[in-house]
Amino acid sequence: MVLNEELVEGVRLELEIERIVHGGLGLGHVDGFVVMTPFAAPGDLLSVVVVKRRRRYALAEPLAVLRASPWRQEPQCPWFTQCGGCNLGHLAIERQRQVKAELLASELGLPPIELKAGAALRYRNKGSFHVGEDGRLGFYRRGSNELVALDHCLLLHPGLEELLPWLERLVAALKLPVRQVIVQLGHPTTLRFVTLVLASWPGSVPETAAALIGEAEQQGVFTFLHQADKPHRLGQCVFAGTPKNLQVRLCGNDLEVGNAGFFQVNHEIAEHLARDVRAVFEAGPRERVLELYAGMGALTLTLAPVVSHVYAVELVRQATLLGESNAEKLGLCNVTFRTGKCLTIVQRLWRQRFSAETLLVDPPRRGLEPGLIDALEGFRFRRVVYVSCSLPTLKRDLTLFGKQGFRLTQLKAYDMFPQTYHFEMLAVLER
């Protein structure tokens, strides 16, 4: 038997998995000490090796399955344990959703709720690929910057997956340092956008590449080139296809999304989420709403017809311009978009004595920025509607709102990202 003090890097041990925790990790105990490992299922008995020791827990890598849990299934993806994209593909989809529901209930101290769900595979309308030195496309290996080249992905919509061979030919023909390739699919149209992020731009597209781009446009595939000085940045657009924006339909509204811009990657579940957000506002009197992290206005424009006014704040100027353009096309006059940091604009609104009945937030995974909840306290909102893709930050922010007298009155969850541990949540707080 391995003792607590012997749990150091390199030690091999047997680990019985009790449950799945945040990050999709299987959790077990050795001599009362927490050990977590990926690609595990409740009831598994695994042979693992410790790779990292912390004060309160250890991380391990699985070596072999000594006794398989009935929850297990054979992963459908040949790159499952290599690629960093998925972490629950070894569980049947019903078990994946059970894991998420139980995790949500455990973290928030509530009874389990059923996740709204759709397709388990082929649901992504957007994909982002890294490019290797040999021009192959793929994803980074889990926990590293090493590229795992692949020729298909079971999460991608077939209309995007079929582009992969053409994309590798285009990367080769460009003869330019391509950092990243982003593919997007419209809905319900079949238009597809391809955005290549370049480390440098010579000022023109080579003839062979231009021919490939022209041929693809005949099939509804439009190419954009961006030049970025730093990795993981989109940079400036230096070559643009026609049309300039991709169209998506949400709750009956046809919205334009910029190339490589943010929109939920799962159209089917995004529709459920948007309808549920609108239903929150339909149930009461028409009211003024302050929306933070509004993006290009997908939720803004969905709820505008059922409220008095929406004041929408977003950091990215391109997104607010799209929001204004979409509002104008839809004939919505009760929407105001502002560009800037949420905290800065909230402080300005406070000085201007702005008032609204409800706060709507849809922040990135890191949650509301530091100091923002304190800055919002003086507005005395009667209700907060919080859309979240991160359970830890939602739990943190609900606690902070609770100190201002808010209580959770409604909670829904959505399996927006099957095969991964991520999911979307909608929380309503009132006081």
Image (spheres, rainbow, N blue to C red):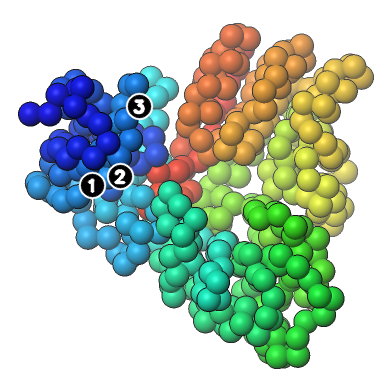
Q: Is residue 218 left or right of residue 405?
A: right
> Mark 2 or mark 1, which has the lower sequence index?
2
> Mark 3 or mark 1, which has the lower sequence index?
3
> Image quadrant for the N terminus?
top left
Which of pointers 2 and 1 indicates the residue nearer the eye?
1
- Secondary structure at badge 3 equals loop
Q: Position of residue 321 (x, y in %)?
A: 85, 51
Looking at this view, is 288 or 146 the one in front?
A: 146
Q: Is 326 above or below relative to 196?
A: above
For residue 62, the mark is: 1
Residue 130 can be seen in this image: yes
> Mark 2 or mark 3, which has the lower sequence index?
2
Looking at this view, is 352 or 344 the one in front?
A: 344
Which of pointers 2 and 3 indicates the residue nearer the eye?
3
Residue type at mark 2 is Pro
Q: Position of residue 355 (x, y in %)?
A: 83, 20
Q: Are marks 2 and 1 in contact (CB under 8 Å)?
A: yes
Residue at the spot x=56%, y=55% of the render? 265
- Secondary structure at badge 2 equals loop
Distance from label 2 to label 3 (Cα)? 17 Å
Residue type at mark 3 is Arg
Residue 101, quarter of the rendered image = top left
Q: Position of residue 150 (x, y in %)?
A: 43, 71
